[in-house]
Image (tube, helix red, strand yellow):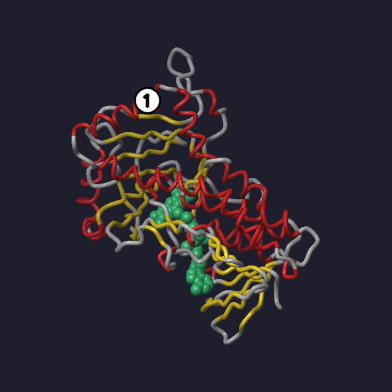
Amino acid sequence: MTSRIAILGGGPVGMVTALLLARRGIAAALYDARPIEDLRRDRRLLALSRGSLQILDTLLGAGTLPMAPIRRVHVSSRGHAGAAHLGPPVTDHAGDATHDPSFGTTPVGATVWYADLVAALARAIDAEPRIVSERPRRVLGLRQYPDHVCVTLDNDTEITCALAIDAEGGPDRHRNAIGAAPVRSHALLADLTLDGLTPGDAFERFTDDGPFALLPVPGSRRQMSMIWCLPSPLAHTRHQLPEKPLLREIAQTLGPRFLAPTAIGSRNLFPLRPTRIDRVCEHRLVHIGNSAQVLHPVAGQGFNLGLRDCVCLVGCLTDTMAGTDIRRTHDVPAALARYAATRRLDRAVVPALTGMLPQLFSSAPLPIAVARSAALGALDLLPNVRRAFARLLMFGVRV
Ligand SMILES: Cc1cc2nc3c(=O)[nH]c(=O)nc-3n(C[C@H](O)[C@H](O)[C@H](O)COP(=O)(O)OP(=O)(O)OC[C@H]3O[C@@H](n4cnc5c(N)ncnc54)[C@H](O)[C@@H]3O)c2cc1C
């Protein structure tokens, strides 16, 4: 047996899990199909919640990752009344605080490039003697037995472990996936240059074509990262447009009250297929992160939710494993059942909420338009509602 725990997939969720286990003194072997250089070419900018930043700070050390703080999130809907502002208090011209002080004075979150995150995690893993990391090493399949799991790798070897953690992403691989459907929409990503930005501002704008977000870019005061979720044919058309017509389309879509972008960087398309599986545990196999749920990126919650999976799983396992060889106990399935029960609510509420938003804001009928304007107004005006919503986005649902 090479290791008691095998982690299948070394994206950010797999790597964080390996590091959290190692910090509790537990060894793991991690396998990823791609070299780290491949992952570092990814052009996603991740918005991390305050809760996620706390987790990463304890693993990597505060200040290790290049980040841009998010101080205020402005949520609005093109062509409709109502807007909401989430963030710590700012003072108006009379010197009065205009936002809810319950946010404190620290940023609500920060952005980090996926590429920088995986590079920092890979460095931490290289420095950790309790983790054996093999990449590129594809997992081809696994077989479960009452007291162990056999994992087959693409170098004709088979490893035996007490527990397999699936962090391979893409839940549509599973039979019990809910909502796995053909890809109908894509996210168009690009950096926009805008003049007159307020540092720390982030924008979420619901447009007729789909949700449009602008996030602050680490190390830049003039650029924001655009993520525009669009029906697939439109996303492909806009991906190919020359710069000037695309800038015009963006300015028209955002409306006259928004800053108009003056330049656009290279563009990337990501297919969107929100999915989740119901059963995250199967005897000695557990699915976490994107293997268990893929969220619509509208509210930037996928990795934040995945990180909470990692922390909860390691907590449940270490309660079980302290000082024992889990292969000789019957505790692993019990620990996984505890994990599934603890994560049930967060895994149900956050995907449902983020899945509902694009539909709610793209529906034209008048009652829905009135309801969403009222909802945005309520979010802005009612401190209790705003506080509850912000806590949900920053820390998830706690049981
Ligand atoms: C456009 C976009 C924007 C996003 N923005 C945000 C955001 O702002 N905030 C946020 O919280 N989330 C965001 N997300 C979601 C976030 O990117 C994911 O939740 C996160 O990457 C999940 O990490 P993961 O490690 O579970 O999966 P992945 O990042 O998909 O990693 C899976 C790993 O498994 C490996 N693998 C796959 N198959 C095998 C195999 N057979 N054998 C071995 N290895 C294998 C892959 O090589 C990969 O490295 C966004 C997503 C998209 C698409």
Name the quarter where the N terminus is drawn.
bottom right
Task: Look at the numbered disc 1 and give the secondary structure of its residue.
Answer: helix
- Residue 87 at x, y = what percent? 48, 30
Q: Which residue shows up at 62% across the image and 55% down it?
A: 313
Q: Which residue is mark 1?
A: 378
Q: Which residue shows up at 45% across the image and 59% down it?
A: 277
Q: Name above or below for residue 126 compared with residue 204.
A: below
Q: Which residue shows up at 55% across the image and 71% down it?
A: 32
CB of residue at label 1: within 8 Å of ligand 1? no
Residues 25 and 173: in front is 173
Residue closest to the far right: 323
Name the quarter where the C terminus is drawn.
top right
Is residue 45 visible in the rendered structure shown here? Answer: no
- In the visual, does 121 lie left or right of 381? right
Q: Name above or below for residue 5 compared with residue 120.
A: below
Is residue 227 visible in the rendered structure shown here? Answer: yes
- Residue 30: image quadrant is bottom right
Q: How many marks?
A: 1
Name the amino acid, label 1.
Ala
- Residue 166 at x, y = what percent? 55, 66
Residues 330 and 211: in front is 330
- Residue 142: image quadrant is bottom right
Residues 212 and 339: in front is 339
Residue closest to the far top: 94
Circle 1 residues within 10 Å: few <14, some 14–19, many ≥20: some
Residues 153 and 70: in front is 153
Q: Which residue shows up at 58% across the image and 51% down it?
A: 65
- Residue 132 at x, y = what percent? 68, 71
- Residue 22: image quadrant is bottom right
- Residue 33 at x, y = what percent? 52, 74
- In the visual, does 145 lie left or right of 351? right
